[in-house]
Image: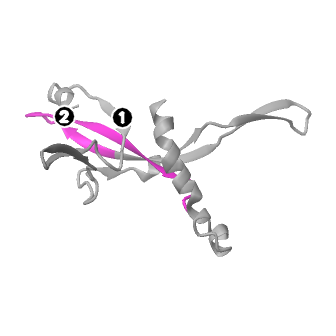
Amino acid sequence: MDSLATLNVPAIGYGIRYEFGMFEQIIEDGWQVERTDKWLQLGNPWEIPSTDCEMEVKFGGHTEEYHDQEGLHHVRWVPDYVVNGLPYDTPILGYRTNMANRLRLWKAQAAESFDFSRFNLGDYAGAVDKKVEIGNHLPRFVSQ
């Protein structure tokens, strides 16, 4: 992205905004050990959340057939999972030029992260089921 900006070639890069980076490697007792790279723990001052561009992303599911009031046959898709995608934009500056390209990383979050009705019934774990379920399944969807 920075090479394109340096060459004054406009471009937009897209990717996934993972909460954790690849990993951090250290040597412990003579062995290589990988640790979580918490690259966002202090925030990222260069990124700009674009809340006006949030998108609903649907995964899996099935179709249902139905007839409308006029008797016309229709088929609708009913997804298994719905995730909100929130874009974060980072300007990528060129070297010795006025060009800036955009890197857009998408953060996935559960559409409904807290179920107050389940919470009010005393089902505290169930109140966050959707958030946990999306977190457990998202890597599988993303890698396919």
Q: Residue furthest left?
A: 96
Q: Is residue 137 magenta?
A: no
Which residue is more in the foreground, 144 or 47?
Answer: 144
Check residue 99 in the rendering and tell me which mark sits there, or answer none.
2
Which residue is more in the foreground, 108 or 74?
Answer: 108
Residue found at x 49% / y 37%: 140
Q: Which residue is mark 1?
A: 14
Give the amino acid at mark 2.
Answer: Met
> Mark 2, residues whose alpha carbon is within 10 Å: few (<14), some, or many (≥20)?
some
Range shown magenta: 89-114
Mark 2–mark 1 distance (CA, rounded to whole Å): 18 Å
Q: x, y percentage for residue 8?
A: 18, 27
Examine the rendering and report whether any part of residue 55 can be seen: no
Q: x, y percentage for residue 34?
A: 24, 45
Q: x, y percentage for residue 132?
A: 52, 55
Q: Residue furthest front?
A: 29
Residue found at x 20% / y 26%: 4
Left or right, 118 with reference to 99: right
Secondary structure mainly formed by the magenta segment: strand
Q: Quadrant of residue 104?
A: top left
Q: x, y percentage for residue 83?
A: 54, 47
> Mark 1, residues whose alpha carbon is within 10 Å: few (<14), some, or many (≥20)?
few
Residue found at x 23% / y 31%: 1
Q: Nearer the viewer, mark 2 or mark 1?
A: 1
Left or right, 72 with reference to 7: right
Examine the rendering and report whether any part of residue 113 can be seen: yes
Left or right, 18 with reference to 64: left
Residue found at x 28% / y 58%: 41
- Which SS class for mark 2? loop
Q: In the rendered structure, which disc, 2 or 1, sits on the residue that comes first in sequence? A: 1
